[in-house]
Amino acid sequence: MRQPARTFQDLIVWQKAHQFVLSVYQFTSNFPKSETYGLSSQFRRAAVSIPANIAEGFKKKGTLDKARFMNIAQGSLEECRYYLILSHDLGYGDTSELMPQIEEVSRLLTSYVNSILNSDS
């Protein structure tokens, strides 16, 4: 049986979300300069919001409060999913490496939310 997470950094979902952010920063660094304050900035902001909300929600005491932060992270993840589609359609780069990452984070986040909602604490 796995040890319970002591910090948000122990959570696999946070680790994968953080890796996704690093990948998004690398991916958007190749965007046209005209997107510096547009899509690039929005994409990065939404990506950072995923692990940031996981981290913030981790220390919340109530189940519903904790789940609310994870739901915000899920919303930001879906926003990033759209930005990946848009980036691809605009020809800003190859999104084939980012798509599996976002799918994995989505799956892990859904599992984490379900475990929070099904816990007694």
Image (cartoon, rainbow, N blue to C red):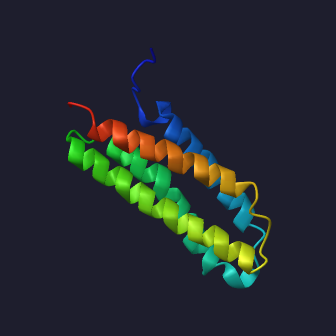
The residue nearer to you, when weighing 84 against 41, is 84
Q: Quadrant of residue 38?
A: bottom right
The residue nearer to you, when weighing 100 against 27, is 100
- Quadrant assignment for the C terminus: top left
Q: Residue furthest top?
A: 1
| In-image side of 20 versus 115 (left or right) | right
Q: Residue furthest bottom?
A: 34
60 versus 81 height, above or below: above
Q: In the image, residue 57 lies at what x, y percent?
A: 33, 46
| In-image side of 97 versus 48 (left or right) | right
Q: In the image, residue 106 lies at what x, y percent?
A: 52, 51
Identify the residue shown where x is 48% and y is 30%.
Answer: 10
- Quadrant assignment for the N terminus: top left
75 versus 23 height, above or below: below
Identify the residue shown where x is 68% and y is 81%.
Answer: 35
49 versus 62 height, above or below: below
Identify the residue shown where x is 39% and y is 22%.
Answer: 4
Q: In the image, residue 93 lies at what x, y percent?
A: 79, 69
Identify the residue shown where x is 63% and y is 46%.
Answer: 19
Does residue 45 appear in this view?
no
